[in-house]
Each structure stands twice: as C-alpha cells, then as structure tokens.
Image: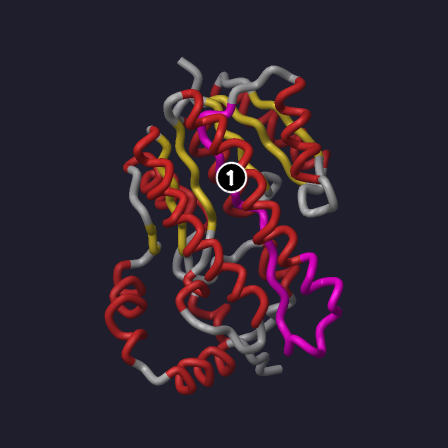
Amino acid sequence: MSNTALITGASSGIGAELARYHASKGGDLILTARRADRLADLKAELERDHGITAHAIAQDIGAVDGAAALAAQIEGAGLRVDILINNAGFGGLGNHIERPLTDEMAMIDLNVKTLTELTHVFGAKMAAQGGGKILNVGSVAAFMPGPKQAVYFATKAYVQSFSQAIDHELRPRGVTCTVLCPGYVETEFGDRADFGDAPMTKNSKLTAAQVAKIGYDAMQRGKLVAITEFQMAVALNWILPFVPRRLVMGLVEKVQTKTG
C-alpha cells in the first residue's frame, strides 16, 4: 500500500525532521527544496538508515510557476502522493514599510500562494484516490497581529483559517487537513528571518525533531489544530482572546525587538 509523503522545505529544520520521522515509519518520500546538495544528502541518509525510497526534487516552489513545475515533475515521474506536508515558508524581522517590498511579496508567494496551490493540486488527487492527509505548518503567530513581522503573522493566520476550512471540505472524501502551530524553534528559519537576540528566541523549548513528531502524530490522528505546548494552547485559546488588542500588539512588538 502506497504511503508516500511530499514534504516542501525538506532540506533543513522541521522539514528535514518530518522526513526522518516519516521514513522511520517505513514511508517513502518526495523531498523538495531549493538546495540540491542538502536534498541529496538527506535522500542518501534516509534510504540508508530506513530502507525506504526517497525522491529529491530541487525546485524553488515560491518562484513564478514553481509549484506547477514541482507538480509536473511528480506527475511525470508517475509518483502518487498520499501525504502532503506544506512546510516551506520564511519570515523576516522589521517594520513593514522599512523592509524590501520584494521580500514581503515573496513571503506571501511562498507562505500563502504556493501552499494554496499545492493543496489544491494534491488535495484533489487525494480526494479522487479516496483518502490522504495534509499537514500545513503554521505558527502560534496565527493567533495574533504581529508588529515587527506584520506580513509573516498575517500569512500564518491565513494558513490556519484555510487549513481548517479545507479539512471541513475534504474530510467527507477521506482527506484530513491538520495545521501545526509551534512557537519559536531554533532552526535556520531564525537565521533567515534575522531574529538575532530578540527576546522571543530565548523562549524556545522544543527541538525541531520534537515539533515534527507532534505535528506528524496529530496529522495521523486527523487533529484539526496542533499547538505544540499545552500551556501555550491554554493561553492562546482561553486567555489571549480576552486581552485588549493594543496590549497584545505591544507585547508582540517587545518580544520581537532586538536588545543589542
């Protein structure tokens, strides 16, 4: 029985750990990211350590027609996708009008447009196959506005809303959709976002491997939203909604402001 997972942003961080965890369960993989050398190394590792088959496709899926090019390569290779894990994404610290507009728009392209396109393409295929699972990697940022990362927080709010609606639409056809909402995790994501010594980086409690396991297991159970820590889930669901918005935004700005 086919059990192939397509993982975007698979070359490092949570994406690579999701690939390792799926492979440890005996599942085959389609790995995609921009860095061909990293993908080749990961493919070799997983096939050696777990005896599975991994396909590596180097592709900038955030570029114009990048998602379509990925889908075409998968179809051309005759591969079936049973699990879609939309992990690729990036953030960037700074006030919106002071950041390069090209970076902000590229963030929307990858975090929102590409995720939506791949969900549309492979969600339809899963529904036609009679089953499948989707895991979209969101963030606790989805629960609040994010001064200093206005666009990133907004993209994750989209991912959370979209994922839940997709689950409702596709569940009757055997396809579930889970959104994973971690807090800050120490990965290359933080380096690309230039977080530096912002206070938010001091509160990282879980590793990428731990977050990957939480998200993957929640996906397998068909859970709708997976927040990685119980205390955080309580705060986000039962406390934050009653805190004045301007106070929330002030606190978010403070934890994202570099101290150096």
In the depicted view, which residue is nearer to us: 134 or 148? 134
Let me know if residue 84 is in the magenta part: yes
Q: In this view, does 74 lie above or below 20?
A: above
Q: Which colour scheme is used?
A: secondary structure
Please identify the quarter of the rendering in which residue 258 is found.
bottom right
In the depicted view, which residue is nearer to us: 226 or 10? 226
Q: Is residue 196 above or below residue 211?
A: below
Please identify the quarter of the rendering in which residue 194 is found.
bottom right
Q: Where is residue 98 in the image (x, y as percent from the top left)?
A: 71, 78
The residue located at (37%, 40%) in the rendering is 169
Amino acid marked by disc 1: Thr
Q: Position of residue 36 (x, y in %)?
A: 72, 34
Q: In this view, does 237 lie above or below 36?
A: below
For disc 1, the neighbor class at 10 Å (few under 14, some 14 to 19, many from 20) is many
The residue located at (63%, 35%) in the rendering is 32
Q: Name the residue under label 1.
A: 119
